[in-house]
Image: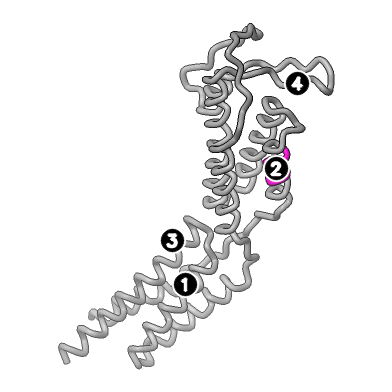
Amino acid sequence: NLQRGGQRNWLLNEAEALANLAQQRLLLTADLAAAERLLLASDQTLARLHDSRVLPARKALAQDLDAVRAAQQVDVQALVLQLGALQQRVASLVIPVTAQQRSVAEKAPPADDAGWWQTLLYNLPVTVRREQAALPLPLDASQASSLRLYLDNCLQQAQLSLLQGKPESYRQALGAMQSALSAWLASDSADSKHLQASIDGLLQQDVEQALPEIGGGLAAIRGLQVEFAQ
């Protein structure tokens, strides 16, 4: 009857939305746990139809679930939270500031299309190392602010690369932060030691995650929607 047909369509639409969201979460945030929960919810929604015609779609969803569960699990959210904690530490980072103007080596200004990394680096002094134990060049207040902003942006870039499943960009961002810390903060400072140790730990973690291909369940549900609409 009409009422039962309306309920069936509502359940099909709900199952389709859940399966579609599972695919989006996997592609955009590499969140395997969320994808698994959403696929399970989609299957449970189909089960409420009590119709044998949905069995092929449920089988396709089961195959998607198996692919998600078999994939290597990298806790992306935990890593993002660690990077966020480092951002808070950078915000409170004590950077020695000098009020004196120091002459620095000539630097060519950044090109008009230079990225934010190059622009920020241009505002920092050139460090000339004459010996291994040479101290970093003192920074004025503006340069210290630029350094803090640069470090924060490195961490933001690392977070974004993680969420987009780009491990090489993730490592490059953390490597750039390490280089900046080595160049402009004394290696014996407690803040620098903590940040360097934290970055070392993050770089040692395996963030390579081959995302499984899913979508069979979603395609099958959409096929059901067409079939039931006829």
- Nearest to viewer (mark 1 / mark 3): 3
| Residue 157 lies in quadrant | top right
Q: What residue is pinned by disc 3?
A: 24
Tell me how far mark 1 sits from mark 3, CA to CA. 14 Å
Amino acid type shown at disc 1: Gly
Amino acid type shown at disc 3: Gln
Note whether 71 is above or below 204 in the view shown: below
Q: Position of residue 127 (x, y in %)?
A: 70, 17
Tell me how far mark 2 sits from mark 3, CA to CA. 36 Å
Magenta-colored span: 193-198
Which mark sits nearer the N-terminus, 3 or 4?
3
Q: Quadrant of the N terminus?
A: bottom left
Residue nearest the observer in this picture, 123 or 134: 134
Amino acid type shown at disc 2: His
Which mark sits nearer the N-terminus, 2 or 4?
4
Q: What residue is pinned by disc 1?
A: 216
Tell me how far mark 3 sits from mark 4, CA to CA. 49 Å
Which mark sits nearer the N-terminus, 1 or 4?
4
Q: What residue is pinned by disc 4?
A: 135
Residue located 71% across and 40% down the image: 196
Which mark sits nearer the N-terminus, 1 or 3?
3
Which mark sits nearer the N-terminus, 2 or 1?
2
Q: Mark 3: which secondary structure?
A: helix
Residue nearest the observer in this picture, 155 or 214: 155
| Residue 209 lies in quadrant | bottom right
Q: What residue is pinned by disc 2?
A: 194
Residue located 58% across and 61% down the image: 211
Q: Mark 2: which secondary structure?
A: helix
